[in-house]
Each structure stands twice: as structure tokens, then as C-alpha cells.
Amino acid sequence: MVEDVTAAELDDILRTEPRLVMIEFWSDGCAPCRRLRPDLERLAEQEGQPCRILAVNAGTEMAAAERYHVRSQPTLVFVKSGVELHRLHAGAL
């Protein structure tokens, strides 16, 4: 299951999660975000999932969106051990 989290929860998880974390930054009213979510849910439910999938509402959790320089939604940010490894923006999804 994709976990919807707040900015504070995101910080706590990133400090302790040993696996790769994929963060989806989304917003209300974002049609591409609504289309992407079922795919992320299917990915999160796969057995042996090598990463943890989190979702942050960029409209309500603006501090987290700013910290990760999110300018459009959806944006996927991949983080491991506190280091951003890769990101995909709305146009690339």
C-alpha cells in the first residue's frame, strides 16, 4: 500500500528506513496524479517490494515540497540513506 504521510512523518521515515524510498509528491485536482496512483498501489503491493512507497500532498505539505524542490506534480523522488538518487517529473511520467 502507498503510505500517505506528512512532512514530519516523511522525515522520521527517511531517518530510519534502510530500503530505497520512492516519494510521490501529488496535489488535489491533479489528473495525472489520480491516473498514476493505481499503478503505484499495484507496485507497492508486489511481494518482495525492494522499496517503500510514500505519498506527500505537495499542496498541504509545502515544506516537504520546497525541501525537495518540487515544482510540478506528480514528481517522484527516490531516496536512500537520506540521499536523493533520482527523480521523475510530471512530463517524464
Image: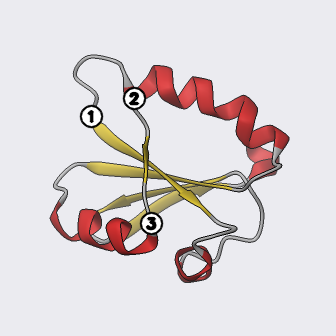
Q: Are marks 3 and 2 in contact (CB under 8 Å)?
A: no
How far apart are labels 3 and 2 at the CA level?
19 Å
Q: How many marks?
A: 3
Residue named by callout 3: 6
Residue type, mark 1 in image: Pro
The residue indicated by pointer 2 is: 44
- Residue at horizontal 61 percent and vertical 82 percent from the top: 66
- Viewer-nearest of labels 1 and 3? 3
Secondary-structure class at tag 3: loop
Q: Residues within 10 Å of mark 3 (few under 14, many from 20)?
A: some
Asked if residue 33 lies left or right of residue 6, the reply is right
- Under circle 1, the secondary element is loop
> Closer to the camera, 79 or 25?
25
Q: Are marks 1 and 3 in contact (CB under 8 Å)?
A: no
Residue 86, percent from left and from top? 51, 58
Q: Residue at x 83, y 49 (%)?
A: 29
The first of marks 1 and 3 along the sequence is 3
Location of the C terminus by quadrant is top right
Q: Quadrant of the N terminus?
A: top left
Kind of residue indicated by mark 2: Ala
Label 1, on which residue?
50
Instruction: Please tell me how crowded label 1 is: few (under 14), some (14-19), or many (20+) other residues with Cα within 10 Å.
Output: few
Q: Are marks 2 and 1 in contact (CB under 8 Å)?
A: no
Q: Is 42 on the left-hand or right-hand side of 91?
A: left
Left or right for 37, reference 83: right
